């Protein structure tokens, strides 16, 4: 892109940059790499309006890598609850521990400060959950290195700017590598002392002006350089992505003891293998009423007082579109005091704070 277009882009961004909790007032100021990492990870698959409050609460509880590294997975999930894609939170904790360990001497005292954040793309991409985009964002926004980024916003902008009728995820053909073509445009944008501003300006442009639907081309600082706009074909770019959707129907069990405790299970669940959730399993629609055999993995059928249908709810996890029946199983015995591996009985009044996934909370809302 020519120098004049980049100058116009920077001027537009300085005038229109939204106030965000992870964005400094001085747009030229270097940033805390930890804060960049957390905000950019939260923003993956999640809207800015949603992330604002989560980021503020997270940073108040986990202000740096050292604090986060000492947290339990359960607490991290609690602060992530509602953002979905829990593998992101799990990887954040793993990476925090690795960074904290690398910044500590053998005698346990910190070295080179408390964070010792990696300074190269190779080092960052070797950490759990940090890919090419996040590594580029950390190095660019925090350290002002000439590092490229490529997210959905930039893909959309480049597709329109250069009339690219393919996506970076398309298969290579006829000597053309779609991913590399997009990354080359991203590197061109980053080949400047102002790479950090170009990268963030493009993300802001994609979020507010060059939107998926109804882009506001008349307000775009790059309109004069955009082939799609000049040819009045903005709606044709980027080409539609083929979506894969999987329907899943299941049953969620809310098992409640006589002393009002709810059974939570850890592991062995299709969508929540490494966190506590309500027991659930795939089942046909309109399944026969009564105590399902799957429930007897956790309770004695003779201890069941009643089994009632509590309703249905819908939920989405990645490409899975889920519809779930909720069964409320009430027992005529108290919750056992002996600990059973991978299970826990949680007081009903504490469930909202205990379960770190909205899936379980939606099911619990169905019982009265």
Image: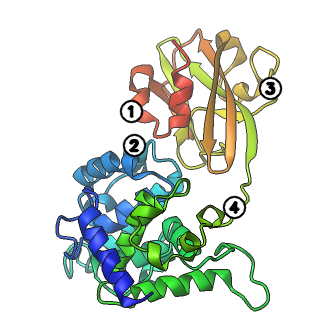
Task: Specify which label sits upstream in the sequence, 2 or 4.
Answer: 2
Reading the image, the residue beneath label 4 is 240
Q: Quadrant of residue 38?
A: bottom left
Reading the image, the residue beneath label 1 is 353
Q: CA distance from mark 4 to mark 3?
A: 32 Å
Tag 1 secondary structure? helix
Reading the image, the residue beneath label 3 is 285
**Mark in front: 4 vs 3:** 4
Q: CA distance from mark 1 to mark 3?
A: 31 Å
Task: Specify which label sits upstream in the sequence, 1 or 4.
Answer: 4
| Residue occupying image coordinates x 51% and y 55% | 45
Tag 4 secondary structure? loop
Task: Specify which label sits upstream in the sequence, 2 or 3.
Answer: 2
* Structural crowding at the residue carrying mark 4, measured as other residues with C-alpha within 10 Å and reported as few (<14), some (14–19) or many (≥20): few
* Structural crowding at the residue carrying mark 3, measured as other residues with C-alpha within 10 Å and reported as few (<14), some (14–19) or many (≥20): few
**Mark in front: 1 vs 4:** 4
**Mark in front: 2 vs 3:** 3
Reading the image, the residue beneath label 2 is 78
Task: Specify which label sits upstream in the sequence, 2 or 1.
Answer: 2
């Amino acid at each position: 892109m020519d120098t004049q277009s980049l100058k116009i882009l920077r001027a537009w961004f300085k005038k229109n940059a939204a106030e965000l909790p992870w964005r400094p007032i001085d747009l030229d100021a270097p940033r805390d790499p930890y804060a960049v990492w957390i905000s950019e990870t939260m923003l993956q698959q999640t809207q800015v309006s949603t992330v604002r409050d989560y980021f503020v609460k997270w940073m108040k509880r986990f202000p740096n890598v050292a604090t986060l590294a000492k947290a339990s997975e359960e607490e991290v999930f609690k602060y992530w609850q509602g953002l979905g894609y829990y593998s992101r939170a799990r990887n954040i904790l793993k990476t925090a521990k690795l960074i904290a360990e690398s910044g500590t001497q053998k005698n346990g005292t910190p070295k080179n400060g408390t964070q010792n954040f990696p300074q190269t793309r190779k080092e960052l991409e070797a950490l759990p959950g940090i890919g090419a985009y996040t590594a580029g964002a950390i190095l660019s926004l925090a350290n002002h290195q000439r590092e490229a980024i490529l997210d959905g916003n930039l893909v959309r902008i480049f597709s329109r700017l250069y009339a690219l009728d393919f996506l970076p995820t398309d298969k290579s053909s006829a000597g053309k590598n779609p991913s590399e073509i997009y990354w080359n445009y991203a590197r061109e944008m980053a080949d400047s002392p102002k790479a950090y501003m170009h990268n963030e300006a493009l993300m802001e442009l994609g979020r507010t002006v060059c939107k998926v639907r109804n882009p506001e081309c008349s307000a775009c600082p790059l309109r004069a350089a955009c082939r799609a706009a000049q040819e009045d074909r903005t709606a044709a770019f980027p080409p539609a992505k083929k979506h894969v959707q999987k329907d899943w129907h299941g049953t969620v069990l809310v098992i409640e003891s006589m002393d009002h405790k709810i059974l939570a299970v850890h592991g062995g669940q299709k969508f929540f293998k490494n966190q506590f959730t309500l027991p659930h399993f795939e089942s046909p629609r309109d399944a026969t009423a009564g105590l399902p055999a799957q429930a007897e993995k956790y309770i004695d059928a003779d201890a069941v007082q009643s089994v009632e249908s509590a309703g249905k709810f819908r939920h989405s996890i990645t490409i899975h579109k889920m519809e779930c029946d909720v069964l409320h199983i009430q027992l005529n015995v108290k919750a056992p005091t002996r600990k059973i591996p991978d299970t826990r009985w949680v007081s009903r009044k504490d469930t909202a704070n205990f379960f770190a996934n909205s899936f379980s909370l939606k099911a619990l809302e169905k019982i009265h």
